[in-house]
Image (cartoon, helix red, strand yellow):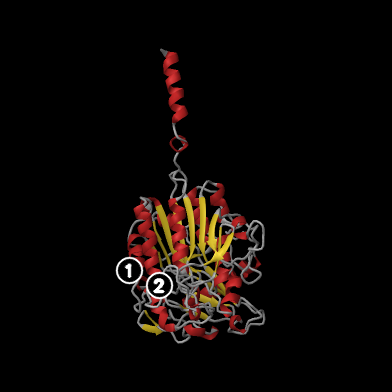
Amino acid sequence: MRLFALSSCLLLFTFLSPALLAAKDNRPNILLILADDFGRELLPVYGGSSYETPHLDQLSKDGLTFETCYATPLCAPSRVELITSQYSFRSYKTWGEMNHQADTYVRRLRESGYQTIMAGKWHMGGWDQEPPGIVTTGFQRYCSYDYPVVIQECLKRKGNQYWGGQLLQDGVESRLEGYGPDVFSEYIIQEIEARDPNKPFFAYYGMNLMHRPFYPTPDHPEAPKSGEPTPRDWMGPRGSAENFPTMVNYADRIIGRLRAALERMGLSENTLVIFTADNGTDCVGEAKGIESAYQGRMVSGGKYFPIERGASVPLICSWPKGIKAGTKSNVLSDFPDLGITLCELAGAEPVADSDGRSLLPVFKGGQPKPKAFVYTWGNFERSSKRYKDPANNLDYLLDVVRSPRWKLYSDGRLFDLKQDPFEEHPLSLDEDSPAAEKARAALIEYREQLRASQPKLW
């Protein structure tokens, strides 16, 4: 009898599928959405009133909204900072490139068992490497494009990141068929559907919207249908500001589409969805003259400049299983914090030499020991007049450090953000109150410590 029972068990074990035999990994899934040139003034949850963003409003209602999150005021350095969990002055050297051998939280997640997916704007180079830098950095599956190549193509009206541009998907090069943001967001959805259900996933969606050129979305009456050629006039380097509001609306709808897909697949409860942006809204080219209602006044975009509208970006996090809905946090945060947070959340080894501090205690409703200061910097390309330090510092850098109330520029300007949130009235040394004098000294000390520090700061 015992032999028969043992034989039966062995037979049953033989016919069980590998999926049933594999232990399910119940760590949370992660969907990180990085919008492009998407300033806080575009969102009602941050005080904007020019645009309707119901899906992002709902994301905020369902989760946690951070009042302050610092990136840099320009795209490529912010992306390097996000992926390495280090302030980008440590690793950012050349426009649109990073050291792909650098430690990244994506690689840490992959090594810990996460399935890693990337779609959309990469803008960190490495496409001439084997394997491509995006793979070395930690992504197993990808659908993206070589940004410098697309820039050159759009100058010749051969395609851009929205219509007709280059597509690099899992080692195969082709052309966009359809609207870029649709192609990339659909790739994310398809890859999540095709995943191993017993392993968690990390999906990073680099949304093209709201970067120039401002071209029509598929809602436009003249938008090409499936299989139709894209109008050549839509594939160039310069669009029209009149398309800007519909692009904001379309970006919001994509957020809704991604969340609906998670709900349909039964994944929404244990998926952390993060929405943020690389920097503020653009203010040159066809973006020049665009103003949006924000906190009771009309404002232009802050991209390129380390003012609050340029460097302080949206950060909204929803995770029904782990974050209380409808909460807000005034804890200071910046991009290096995100990678450290995701590693801790996943139980992965933390990124080495990070400038970040985990936000997981904030997710759980606790009161962590917050950062006393956050940091950003300006002037990203000495060869480009557009990116030169507006204060014309001799060292070509405009460092900025901020506490919850005070903000200090390396040219000596100090602002009391509680009284002057739009940074219109810098305090001179002879105007400093005792509180301002104390804040100035602390910020100067922190800046000097930071710039002289070894890579590991905390």
Crowdedness near tag 1: few (<14), some (14–19) or many (≥20) residues, C-alpha within 10 Å: some
The N terminus sits in image quarter: top left
Where, by quadrant of the figure, is residue 440 drawn? bottom right
Residue 274, position as x, y percentages in the image: 43, 61
- Nearer to us of marks 1 and 2 is 2
152 relative to 196, above or below: below
Task: Tell me the element at label 1.
Answer: helix
Where, by quadrant of the figure, is residue 419 drawn? bottom left
> Is residue 438 visible in this depiction of the protein?
no
Circle 1 residue = 54
Circle 2 residue = 218
Residue at 45% across, 83% down: 240
Residue 449, position as x, y percentages in the image: 62, 67
Residue 455, position as x, y percentages in the image: 64, 61
Q: CA distance from mark 1 to mark 2?
A: 19 Å
Where, by quadrant of the figure, is residue 384 drawn? bottom right
Amino acid carrying mark 1 in the image = Pro
Amino acid carrying mark 2 in the image = Pro
> Is residue 71 visible in this depiction of the protein?
yes
Residue at 53% across, 48% down: 348
Does residue 95 appear left or right of residue 364 in this picture? right
109 relative to 74, above or below: above
